[in-house]
Structures are given as structure tokens and as C-alpha cells.
Image (cartoon, grey):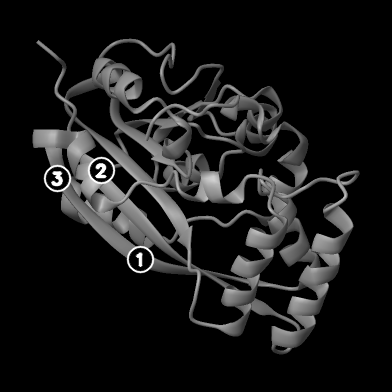
């Protein structure tokens, strides 16, 4: 949970189109759980930090919330504005997780979806405590791809290990429950896990792979062999032209009292 040793804010700049089309959304159970267990209502204002192209922002907009989508990467922020900018409850913000630019005590919920592992954990705790209203909540969640359970999932993991540029170092950045409990400290309020799945044809699978920051791009000598291996894997494991890309969606929630 330490800061990235590379510029995480720019890693996806050349992958925006694939990210928009092929990255998974999040299960409806996330909103249901936040509502039933933690009091989320449509009147809450949400800071979606590391909002990317707006996948998680859309989820909160659909729940009726006003959303400030904080995203430092200009191409990703622009994609979110093109997609969601027609909604008057959507506001794109040029800011970072550690310096959101939002006013103190201005939001009811800070959410970070699929992005927390890129943040400076100590700095964001202070910043999120600053922008939260009293008794406001922070929610950290992500889709965690299953590494085993089917021939496709196991073959895909081998493919990433064989061809990914810095796959191992990125994969190992995800926090576990013990780490999140330490991060929230006394404010920890709970966690939940939900199943989620994408069914992908080959074009979508290719785009899903290329949306990953560790997938070598065209011009890299690993690019063409990686896509050839992906084609072989798909042909061997697809059923009725589709493969199942399975996840566990993990969410952690708590309060972040301001420091004395």
C-alpha cells in the first residue's frame, strides 16, 4: 500500500478506448449493501476518487447520488465527461486522490473503485477525512479477477505471467482484509464480497486484455505473441463463442475521523 514507483496517473492514457468498452462494471449488490448496511441514500454526495472513465460514477448516478468524479488523467476524465456529462448530478474534477480540490466537509461518501492500490495510503486518509462530513464514510472496492476455477481463468493467468510487462508487481499491490482493517483503524465498519462475471467473445477478451496497464502495446516484441496465445486460449476454452471472466468484488467501508 505504498506509493507507486511510477506515474500511475498516466499508465492508462493510451488505453482509454479499450477501458471504456471492455472493463467490467460492478454488481448491483454493492449499492444494495451500502444502502442496507451503511445508510447510503440518494441525497448523499459522493466523491468518486480515481474515477477513471466513469464506470463507478455511473453506478452512483443510477442510485440517485450527486457525484464528483475526481480523476487526474485527462484522457480518462474526458471519456467520463463524454459519457456522463449530460447528467446534471455529475461533476468531473481535475484532482488526485491525495489532493482532490474538494471543499472540506463537502461529501457524505468517498468511494474508490479499482484504484486504491495506486494511492499513497497515508496521504489519502488525511485528504478523505478532510473532505468528509461528520460521520461520513469511505468505501474502497475492486473487482478481483479469479485466478483459478476454470481452464480459461488458469490459462489467462499463465498468459499474464508470460507476457505482462510488470504484471507481478501490479498484481501484488491489492490490499487484503487485514491491510484494510489497519488502514481504517478504529473506523472500520465492515466488508463484503460479491460474485461478478463478464461473458466475452474474442474481440471483447482482446480489448479487456489490452485495457490492462501491464499488457504490452503494439510495437513491443511481446505484443503479437501475447495476442496469438490469447487466440489459442480462447479457441480451446470458449463455449458457444464466449468465455467467462469471473471476479470477486470486494468492498471495505469505514469512517475516517479527522486527526486531532
Query: Is residue 32 toward the left or the right of residue 182 in the image?
Result: right
Helix or strand or loop: what does disc 1 sit on?
Answer: strand
Does residue 256 sit above or below 147 in this rendering? above
Question: How many labels, in total?
Answer: 3
Discs 1, 2 touching: Cβ within 8 Å: no
Does residue 182 sit above or below 120 in this rendering? below
Q: Position of residue 249 (x, y in %)?
A: 40, 59
**Mark 2 = which residue?**
180
Badge 1 local density, few (<14 within 10 Å), some, or many (20+)? some
Does residue 11 sit above or below 63 in this rendering? above
Q: Earlier in the sequence, mark 3 or mark 1?
A: 3
Helix or strand or loop: what does disc 2 sit on?
Answer: helix
Q: Residue at x 76, y 83 (%)?
A: 241
Query: Is residue 218 toward the left or the right of residue 124 in the image?
Result: right
Q: Which mark is residue 194?
A: 1
Q: Position of residue 177 (x, y in %)?
A: 25, 51
Q: Which mark is residue 189?
A: 3
Q: Residue at x 57, y 75 (%)?
A: 154
- How many angstroms separate mark 3 from mark 2 (CA)? 11 Å
Corner quadrant of residue 187: top left
Q: Earlier in the sequence, mark 1 or mark 2?
A: 2
Amino acid at each position: 500500500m505504498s506509493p507507486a514507483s511510477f506515474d500511475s496517473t498516466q499508465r492508462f492514457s493510451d488505453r482509454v478506448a479499450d477501458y471504456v468498452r471492455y472493463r467490467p462494471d460492478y454488481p448491483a449488490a454493492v449499492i444494495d449493501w451500502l444502502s442496507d448496511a451503511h445508510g447510503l441514500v440518494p441525497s448523499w454526495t459522493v466523491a468518486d476518487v480515481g474515477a477513471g472513465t466513469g464506470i463507478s460514477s455511473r453506478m452512483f448516478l443510477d442510485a440517485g447520488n450527486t457525484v464528483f468524479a475526481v480523476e487526474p488523467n485527462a484522457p480518462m476524465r474526458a471519456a467520463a465527461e463524454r459519457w456522463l456529462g449530460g447528467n446534471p448530478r455529475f461533476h468531473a474534477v481535475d484532482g488526485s486522490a491525495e489532493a482532490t480540490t474538494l471543499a472540506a466537509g463537502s461529501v457524505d461518501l468517498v468511494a474508490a473503485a479499482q484504484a486504491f492500490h495506486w494511492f499513497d495510503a497515508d496521504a489519502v486518509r488525511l485528504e478523505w477525512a478532510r473532505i468528509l462530513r461528520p460521520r461520513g464514510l469511505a468505501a474502497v472496492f475492486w473487482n478481483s479477477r479469479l485466478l483459478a476455477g476454470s481452464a480459461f481463468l488458469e490459462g489467462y493467468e499463465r498468459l499474464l505471467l508470460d507476457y505482462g510487462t510488470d504484471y507481478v508487481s501490479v498484481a501484488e499491490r491489492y490490499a487484503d482484509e487485514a491491510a484494510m482493517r489497519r488502514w481504517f483503524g478504529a473506523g472500520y465498519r465492515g466488508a463484503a464480497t460479491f460474485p461478478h462475471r463478464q461473458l466475452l467473445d474474442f474481440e471483447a477478451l482482446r480489448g479487456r486484455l489490452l485495457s490492462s496497464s501491464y499488457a504490452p502495446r503494439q510495437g513491443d516484441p511481446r505484443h503479437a505473441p501475447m495476442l496469438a496465445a490469447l487466440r489459442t486460449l480462447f479457441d480451446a476454452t470458449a463455449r458457444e463463442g464466449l468465455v467467462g471472466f469471473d471476479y470477486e468484488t470486494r468492498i471495505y467501508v469505514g469512517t475516517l475521523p479527522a486527526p486531532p
